[in-house]
Image: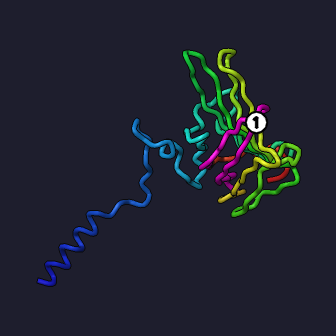
Amino acid sequence: MKKSILFLLLTVALISCKKDDEILQPTLNSTEIEKLPPTTQIGANTAGCLLNGVAVVAEGDEWSEKNPHCGYDQGAFVLLFRQNITEGGHIGTQAVYITTNSNTILEENTKYTIKEQESGKFAMFYVIGDGSIADERYYTTTSNVGELYISKLDKEKNIISGTFWFDAVDSQNKKAEIREGRFDVVYQSMGNKN
C-alpha cells in the first residue's frame, strides 16, 4: 500500500512539472509585460520595455540599421531600439536610446546610473511622427534618473545583455516611465573601447 501511494505521489509530481526553459509567446490576451522579449543572454538581438505600462518592443530593421542597434560609437556605449506606431491611419516611430560617455568601460554584473545629458550617461524616449503624429522627446535629468545593469558581456562573441529602467521628462515636464527594460544583442564595435 505504501508503494502504491508513493508511486501515485511521484506520478502526480512528475505530471505537474513544467520545463524551466519554456519561453512564453505573446498572445492577444497577454499582459503588457508578457509581450516583452524574454530575459536572455545568448545574443538573441531583442530589446523591449514598458512605457508607462505599455510594451515597446524592437521590431523590424529600418534606416539601414539593425533594430535593436547596440555598439560602441567613438568609445561610448549606445543602445537604440524602435517600434512603429500608428494613430488614426498615420504612422510614426517610437524609440528608446541609452548611452554612456566614452570614459565608461562597461563590466559584467555592474550597475550604471543614467542621469542628465551633460553627464554623458543619459537616456531618452522619443516619438518621430509623420506630421500628424507629434514629435516628442523625453530626457533623463538630474532628478529623473535611471539604471543600466550589464548582466552579460562576452567580448569574444560580442554579446551584451542587461536590464534598464529610467524616468524621463519632456520640455513641459510631462513624465515618461520606462520600466522592465531588457536587451540581449550582438553588439558592433565601432570604436576602440569594448
Amino acid, disc 1: Asn
* The N terminus lies in quadrant: bottom left
Quadrant assignment, res 41: bottom right
Residue drawn at x 57%, y 22% as measured from the top left = 86
Quadrant assignment, res 156: bottom right
Q: Is residue 30 above or below residue 11?
A: above
- The extreme bottom residue here reads 2
Q: Position of residue 61 (x, y in %)?
A: 63, 30
Q: Which residue is mark 1?
A: 173
Q: Is residue 36 visible?
A: yes
Determine the main secondary structure of the stretch shown in magenta: strand
Number of marks drawn: 1
Q: Position of residue 99 (x, y in %)?
A: 78, 45
Residue drawn at x 70%, y 47% as measured from the top left = 166
Q: Is 80 contained in the magenta span?
A: no
Categorize mark 1 by other alpha carbons within 10 Å: few (<14), some (14-19), many (20+).
few
Q: Which residues are magenta?
A: 156-182
| Viewer-nearest residue: 164 or 62 | 164
Q: Is residue 90 above or below residue 81?
A: above
